[in-house]
Image: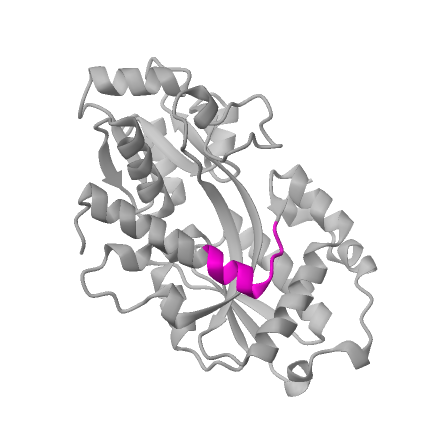
Amino acid sequence: MSLKQVPVITLLTALIVSPATLPAYAQSGGYLQVVVPYAPGGSADIIGRLLTDLLGKQIGRGAVVVNQPGAGGEIGSAYVGRAKPDGNILLFQAPAVTIAQTLRKNPTFDVRRDLAPITQAVESSMGFYVNPEVPVHNIRELIAYAKANPGKLNYASSGIGSSAHLYTELFKTLASVNIVHVPYSGGSAFSASVVRNEAQVLIADSLGSPRPLAASGRLRMIAVGSSARSPAFPDVPTVAESGLPGYAVTYWLGFFAPAGTPSDIVEKLNASLVGILQVPVLRDKLAGQGYSVIANSSADFKTFIEKEVSKWEKLVRDTGIAKE
């Protein structure tokens, strides 16, 4: 059963909510908007819709997802960053939110300045894929092939500043290989480019659009990027164990509010979301799709975000990636 098919009423059986426990702001009327800054149908959209529906029922008000794709998620993130900080609009974002400002000469958006972290909801492994015509079956062979053929392999991403872009640049730096970046406009486009052999290497959410392409043999999955093997792919080794120690990246999704949102609202939202994410049936469904529940505190999520931004700032600085 996919996440799209998870019955919300089943997940709500463990969420017993009485009017007395509802946050005060839930009584204010109107809909809670959750901005997903990507096109419908991807991992962020599917999980975002599920959690938004559950959150609305948990706090006793209508809740809707608004898709605002563009610029690798930066458009939707900046929109929420400019919104009134009253708890009525939230952002559900992925790793790209920590990358955007590192690639701008004069950034107009900064996750540390413009957003208030609420909770990191889930994380999953990133998958390393190659076109089946590339004669490699693991990371050691990929590194050796890339070194023997400098500049002849292309890697695809969903755009400059996307997680696939920076995750592959990190791989190139640690492996000391020359693989050429070819940016595309979205997840399905950059996955398809590797199928067509326009690009030969892809690092992407292992549970997103590449998964069915790999299952059908049109892509070859050779590793996962996380520090531990993915429960969804227990037989697929990590990058670190198969040739590149020290490499570890994950795909994660989390909730943010506009900066300046009162701390009591942030903490009430955190409590509601953490409670939802701890429901056993939801955790089991997410685990079955390869996602681990994080459900951390707003303070811990803030610390995580700051470390992520610092990591990508260092990578951009050390590699000399051109800023826009």
Which is nearer the eye, 175 or 138?
175
Comparing 88 with 245, the one in front is 245
x 67%, y 80%: residue: 26
Determine if residue 132 is in view.
no
Q: Is residue 156 above or below residue 70?
A: above
The quadrant the C terminus occupies is bottom left
The quadrant where residue 21 appears: bottom right
Q: Nearer the viewer, residue 219 or 175?
A: 175
In x, y percent, where is residue 128? 42, 29
Mainly helix, strand or loop, the magenta region? helix
Left or right position of 190 against 281:
left
Which residue is at the front of the view, 275 or 156?
A: 275
Q: Which corner quadrant holds the N terminus?
A: top right
Q: Does the magenta portion include 297?
A: yes
Residue 111 appears in which quarter of the rendering?
bottom left
Q: Position of residue 215 (x, y in %)?
A: 52, 25
Q: Write the residue at 39% across / 66% down.
A: 112
Residue 126 to residue 45: above or below: above
Residues in magenta, as a range: 294-304
Q: Residue pushed farthest bottom?
A: 28
Residue drawn where x is 31% and y is 31% of the image: 174
Is residue 181 in the magenta section? no
Q: Is residue 237 above or below residue 18?
A: above
Colour style of the rendered protein structure: one colour
Number of numbered markers: 0
- The x, y position of residue 320, in whole percent, is 17, 45
Relative placement, left or right, of 155 versus 244 is: left
Q: Position of residue 178 (x, y in %)?
A: 21, 28
Above or below, 66 relative to 313: below
- Tell me if residue 101 can be seen: yes
